[in-house]
Image: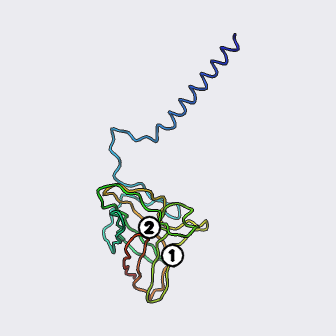
Amino acid sequence: MNVRYARKGLTSLAVASLALFAVGCGAEEKPKADKPAATTPAPQKTPAGQESPGAEEPEEVVAVAKGQKGLELAINSVERDAGGFLTIKGQLKNTSSAGTIISSRLSGDETEVVKHGNSLGGATLVDSVGKKRYYVLRDTDGRPLTTSGLSNLGADRSIPVFLQFPAPPASTTDVSFQLPTFEPATLKLS
């Protein structure tokens, strides 16, 4: 009889431990009902793994690309750097009154880019004078050097985004920014 009670006790202890573990693991993931959700997006990771602030309000809009379902990409800066790169920064905004799922088509069709999840990896720059198309750069693992992990965007919400391309020659002053499901936008390069 003692063995039977010992097994019952161990079984009860194991079940109670699992229940406490399950409750403890989920506690941090649940939002608190008494606090409103944060209105600023989480910081985005840059290719170097550094965080860029998500609450910065850009001062200038150099171009706007309009997409489907009320999505807009407001481009705030287009900068060449000495390393031969062109970095575009902006805000992806949902201008509609309802939340929207961000289309996986923004990642483009390239298998190497698509396998790393939703991103802006399908973006290109087109130099019509030089007759060249520039694609988003990728790291050594094939991940696009752009904002990734995009899934949905609430009504009237925005998130900071970036894209990095090889820089066109210094003589190129205008390019067409193209992103799947968005209208093209002309960018002036300096």
Indicate which disc residue 98 carries.
Answer: none
| For residue 128, above or below residue 155 | below
SS of the residue under disc 1 = strand
> Relative to the observer, which residue lies in front, 114 or 10?
114
Residue situated furthest left in the rendering: 97
Q: Comparing marks 1 and 2, which lies closer to the viewer? A: 1
* Residue 36 horizontal/vertical position (percent): 32, 44
| For residue 169, above or below residue 55 | below
* Residue 14 horizontal/vertical position (percent): 61, 26
Query: CA separation, marks 1 and 2?
Result: 14 Å
* Residue 118 horizontal/vertical position (percent): 49, 61
Residue type at the position of mark 1:
Tyr
Residue drawn at x 33%, y 72% is 64
In this figure, which colouring scheme has been used for the structure? rainbow
Residue drawn at x 44%, y 57% is 151
Q: Earlier in the sequence, mark 1 or mark 2?
A: 1
| For residue 33, above or below residue 160 | above
Residue type at the position of mark 2:
Phe
What is the quadrant of residue 140 in the picture?
bottom right
Residue drawn at x 47%, y 76% is 124
How crowded pointer 1 is (Cα within 10 Å; few <14, some 14-19, many 20+) is rated as some
Q: Which residue is mark 2?
A: 162
Indicate which disc residue 135 carries.
Answer: 1
Verify CB contact (< 8 Å) between mark 1 and mark 2: no
